[in-house]
Amino acid sequence: MSLLAVSIPYWGQSLLRVLGGTVAILLPAGTIVYLFLFKMMSFMQSRLGPMDAGPYGSLQLVAEVGKWMQKEDLAPNGADKRIFRMAPLVVLVSTFLLVVVVPFGPDAYFTNFDGGVFYMLAVSSVSTLGILVAGWSSANKYSLLGGLRAAGQLIAYELPMVLAVVGVVIQAGTMNLQQIVWRQNSDHAAMFGWTGLGNPYLFTQIIGFVVFMIAVQAELTQVPFDMPIAESELVSGYMTEYSGFRFLIFFIAEFATVGVFTMIASVLFLGGWGVPFAWFGWKTTGPGLFDGVANWMNIAGPIILFVKMTVLSFLAMWVRFSYPRLREDQLQRFAWKVLIPVSLLNIMATAILKVVF
Amino acid sequence: MAIRAVLGSYLKGLQVTIVELAQVVKPKRLGGGAATVQYPHEKEAPPIRARGVIALREENCTVCMLCVRSCPDWCIYIEGHKELAPPRRAGGAPRKVNALDRFDIDFALCMYCGICVEVCPFDALFWSPEYEYSEPRIADLLHDVDRLGEWMETVPEAPALEVGADKKGKK
């Protein structure tokens, strides 16, 4: 790997990847929590939110983390202690596994392989295991109910998510996320011969995008799909018995996953780290090759992706703070009777149009 | 249910929150800002009839114990004794009056129901809108006669009677 035309030894690359992965997890999580959870939610409820810790409360998150780290690490008497302690880590690991596949720039990526989309969909359901295990091992009936609801919900919404992504995969003709970025931005991408915006799949796959965002919302157990952690009926569900830094890990994982999923959504539908190459006159020689792209995109790319992620997570959080919780049967009905048929129709239409044009 | 009505109500929900957000973000001089007050830095003026703290006018108290007995959580403590006071007219028998030894209200227990204020037949208890009397030690929330008397200064004037209303009390 040569980043910015500097060749880095293997150990340096590994270190860079570990650091980059941590940043790619913590930075979006921190941004989303501060910007949206602390501030935007407060504004939408006509209050100011945290104001005293740092300028405009920007260090509130540090205070919260400090508070959680000081708390005792409790486990209930009847809990299956080893599993109980492991569960939050499983959830966090699935987030790290997800971020591995996200491309950040022409050379700035953790992995770049052909099964990217497939891998992403596969590892995103690992967190379900962690949640189910957390609910089961807590020895608490509310936690168990929450865990089971999470399992049912995540299975129900995994399907529309997969089907929504299939539309993109058909249109791009590849499962490699870097190539999907290339397809949307390259000098060959055009909408009816106009290359000004490249060809972001947001326009052609708008149905897929909407279904994907709804499924992501459910996958992350965000309002209005937060039955697994419904605080007023299940006392926060599978998280009930957790305290201290294990709760913190759940919390970070939740918002880091919001960040990673919205990053993936922006890769799939908004062109990811790229800007239309036509803007700078970059020429590439083939699919998935970024030979003509300027080197500074390795720095600008992550920032562009971050901005797109922020916009998409704004949408997700806006919905989160606006709606009341659905009922469990409404949730299942919505997934099986609306989202899945709609995304199947979307796949059919995409396939037909792909063959026709 | 019509799909249009459903979608419309979902959009309405989004509109409500974004309008609220815009209202809070709008600069103060344009009439924006949050509905809340940043408490320790700026203070809110409570409405004059707010139930902040209970004040005692000691000379009105006859130790009748009505407030003690009506208090739902028994947070008022009164002790008193009988005293002989000079007769009202020369040559009469000395009067017996109740003197107050102790009048404590434990605001750690008080639930601000106001029944004591309502029930007091001699206008000895009043609501004051003051609310800043928290203490590091919970025992210090027990206000004695002097403390309760100091709150009298903060009791607002009773609002004027409506036109045509009879003035209650002694003629």
Image (tube, grey):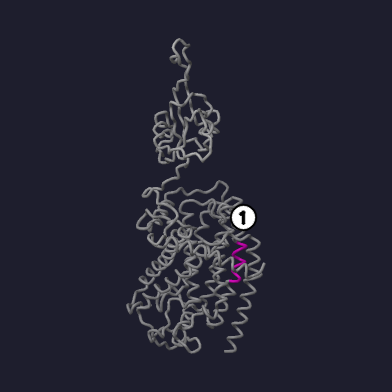
Q: Is residue A154 left or right of residue B35?
A: right
- Mark 1 lies on residue: A145
Q: Position of residue A227 (x, y in %)?
A: 59, 58
Question: Image point 54% across, 81% down: which residue?
Answer: A204
- Residue at the extreme top of the image, as rendered: B91
Give the side of residue B66 with respect to residue A197, left or right.
right
Is residue B130 found inside the magenta-colored segment of the image? Answer: no
Where does residue A68 sit, x and y in percent of width and height? 44, 52
The answer to which of B36 and B29 lies nearer the viewer is B29
- Can you name the residue that lies furthest to the left here? A6
> Mark 1 packing: few (<14 Cα in 10 Å), some, or many (20+)?
many
Image mark count: 1
Residue A338's spot in the image, x, y percent? 64, 71
Q: Residue at x 43, y 89 (%)?
A: A285
Q: Chain of mark 1?
A: A
For the point 49% across and 51% down, which residue is it? A243
Relative depth, front residue between A222 and B60: B60
Q: Is residue A158 magenta?
A: yes
- Residue A264 versus residue A182 in the image, above or below: above
Q: Quadrant of the N terminus of chain B?
A: bottom right
Q: Chief secondary structure of the magenta span? A: helix
Tell me where the magenta segment starts and ends, as one range.
Answer: A151-160
Answer with left or right where residue A135 lies relative to residue A246: right
In the image, residue A262 lies at what x, y percent? 49, 70
Q: Secondary structure at mark 1?
A: helix
Amino acid at the residue labelled 1? Leu
In this image, A84 relative to B131: left or right? right
